Image (spheres, rainbow, N blue to C red):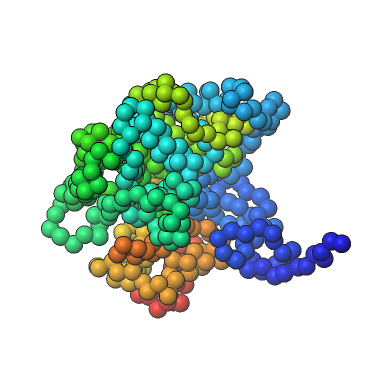
Amino acid sequence: MSKPLMTQVSDAGESRRPSNLFYMTRLRRPLVDRAEGIYLWDQNGKRMIDGSSGAMVVNIGHGNRNVLDAMKRQMDRVTFAYRLHFENEPAEELARRLAAKMPGDLDRIFFVSGGSEAVESAIKLARQWAVATGQESRWKVISRFPSYHGGTAGSLAVTGDLALTETFAPQTRTMPKIPPPTAYRDRDNLSMEQRGLRYADMLEEKILAEGPESVLAFIMEPIGGAATAALVPPDSYFPRIRKICDKYCILLIHDEVMTGAGRTGKYLGGEHWNCRPDIIAMSKGIGSGYAPLGAMAASRRLVGPVLDSGGFQHGYTYAGNPLSCAAGLAVLDEMERLGCIANAAAMGDLLKHELEALAERYPFIANVRGKGLLLGADLVANPETLAPLPPARKANQRLVDLAYERGMIIYSRRIRGDGVEADNFMLAPPLIITAEQVGEMVGVLDDSLAALATELDLPVNG
């Protein structure tokens, strides 16, 4: 006898069947009905501005007909062919075009389904390369705290966020960490260039403390992602990091999962500094939410010894899936046709200027930062000391909720651990956004910040 279907009132306000799904919390959101451009609509007809591109994914916007048509054409031919049985044309062509966009000699591409898998693949390729070249003692992957690199066991080991990692610490081998280059927080007499060098030199100090012969790689986000809300290091940071990695024969891995595919006004975030990583992990924007897709890029120097020593002992069922790769090809075409990268740079400058104006009005916003359409800021109790607001006030979550009520999705995190405590929020709309839509976003955020100030008795200027 089947169980009777019961209804319940969701947090979205409508009567709905109980759900068998579960995610991070008990919070339920409205059922989505459709999406187009930078907007989504729920089944009650309410329109939402996608101010975070989902989770910084939908770079070319929702409902792009050319991408959907390309996927339909591929669906009519073949949707799945296992990589050990067949090669497929979309995967071959997408690999060729992605390789052409990579820096230096990174012309070997390995496809995955998402960002965590891309980071996991990068770590495992690095380790297998070390073993294949007689460097078995190298296994430690240094990363930064805070940082976010994914949710799988390997990517959690290099993630610096206790809220996500400490429960699973007994099951993973936590890797060494160094501080991120949060030079804007420092209160000293050094220039930003000097601070950048000091933060980079922390990598060398950690290498020496761990033993250079044991260190395999250093993984970093060129521009901060979920954990540090679009943190931009001083320009001096990048060449010093590369020099240190070369000095100790350590691989440099760039996590471009969030910053890649045009998000920052360049195809790769590292391009702003002409970076030369050894491995790149990508996802999110390369599939733009139309199909699960990610990629790792490396050089023949790394891939060759691994293949010669018995092959890359790693893989996923959907690696190089023809439907996903067809979507990725169409996304690339649309990025070029729509001028998404140039628009991300231009609209990013406009949005950042507007955010800086809001920070003048609401002094509990500090350090507006980022590049292109990956922008963030901190919520603080004191704009001079950057002391965080008390955790009990849940300021970041309230800001998300207030914006949601007013029809806009933004992204926010609270980071804690190792003396680091901060509330931040991010704005990262689709790269097709117009100046008028930027104004619409700023208006909603302004209203939300005013409501937050009233609710939490925070200061407002003017």
Q: Locate residue 84, reporting x and y percent.
A: 59, 25
Residues 221 and 377: in front is: 221
Residues 72 and 48: in front is: 72
Residue 32 visible to an observer of this rendering:
yes
Above or below for 33 versus 30: above
Above or below for 212 versus 17: above
In the figure, is residue 450 to the left or right of 387?
right
What count of labels does the image hold? 0
In the figure, is residue 440 to the left or right of 175?
right
Residue occupying the point 33% across, 72% down: 381
Residue occupying the point 55% across, 49% down: 38
Residue occupying the point 46% across, 25% down: 311
Residue occupying the point 82% across, 66% down: 4
Residue 261 visible to an observer of this rendering:
no
Q: Locate residue 330, reporting x and y percent.
A: 56, 31
Q: Locate residue 97, reporting x and y percent.
A: 47, 25
Residues 361 and 153: in front is: 153
Q: Locate residue 127, reporting x and y percent.
A: 38, 35
In the figure, is residue 270 to the left or right of 208?
right
